[in-house]
C-alpha cells in the first residue's frame, strides 16, 4: 500500500504511513475496462475503402486498358 500524501510504500496492514504519519486508507484498484471490438459495419467499410484505394492505385499504375 502506498501513502497518498508522500508516496511511501507501507505494509498492506499498516494504519499510518511510516514516513510522514498520515493515516492510510485502503483503495481498490480500478477494474480494467473490457476491450472494445469493432462493429461489423465498421470492419466492412474499412475493407471497402481499402479495396477502393487499391483499385485506384492499380488504375494509376497500369493505366486505362486500350
Image (cartoon, rainbow, N blue to C red):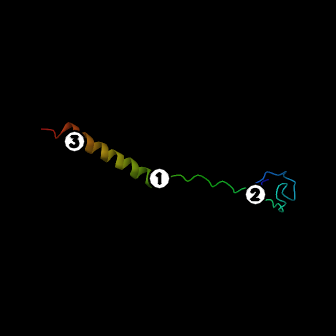
Q: Which residue is found at the position 85% from the left and 54% from the top?
A: 18
Q: Nearer the viewer, mark 2 or mark 3?
A: 2
Indicate the position of residue 1 as horizontal and vertical percent values.
Answer: 79, 53
Q: Earlier in the sequence, mark 2 or mark 3?
A: 2
- Residue situated in front as seen by the camera: 27 or 60: 27
When the figure is inspected, residue 11 is found, relative to residue 24, above or below; the finding is above
Q: Position of residue 20 (x, y in %)?
A: 82, 58
Whether residue 7 is situated above or below residue 57 in the rendered picture: below
Q: Secondary structure at mark 2?
A: loop
Q: Position of residue 38 (x, y in %)?
A: 50, 52
Distance from Cα at disc 3 to Cα at disc 1: 31 Å
Task: Say whether marks 2 and 1 touch (CB < 8 Å).
Answer: no
User: In this view of the protein, which residue sits in the foreground, 21 or 58?
Assistant: 21
Query: Residue 40 got which mark?
Result: 1
Q: Quadrant of the C terminus?
A: top left
Residue to which mark 3 is pinned:
60
Q: Residue 49 appears at what percent x and percent y?
A: 35, 49
65 sits left or right of 15 in the view: left
Identify the secondary structure beneath mark 3: helix
Q: Residues within 10 Å of mark 2 (few under 14, many from 20)?
A: few
* Earlier-in-chain disc, 2 versus 1: 2
Amino acid at each position: 500500500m502506498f501513502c497518498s500524501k508522500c508516496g511511501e510504500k507501507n505494509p498492506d496492514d499498516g494504519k499510518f504511513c511510516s514516513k510522514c504519519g498520515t493515516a492510510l486508507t485502503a483503495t481498490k484498484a480500478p477494474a480494467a475496462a473490457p476491450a472494445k471490438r469493432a462493429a461489423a459495419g465498421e470492419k466492412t467499410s474499412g475493407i471497402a475503402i481499402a479495396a477502393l484505394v487499391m483499385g485506384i492505385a492499380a488504375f494509376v499504375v497500369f493505366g486505362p486498358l486500350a
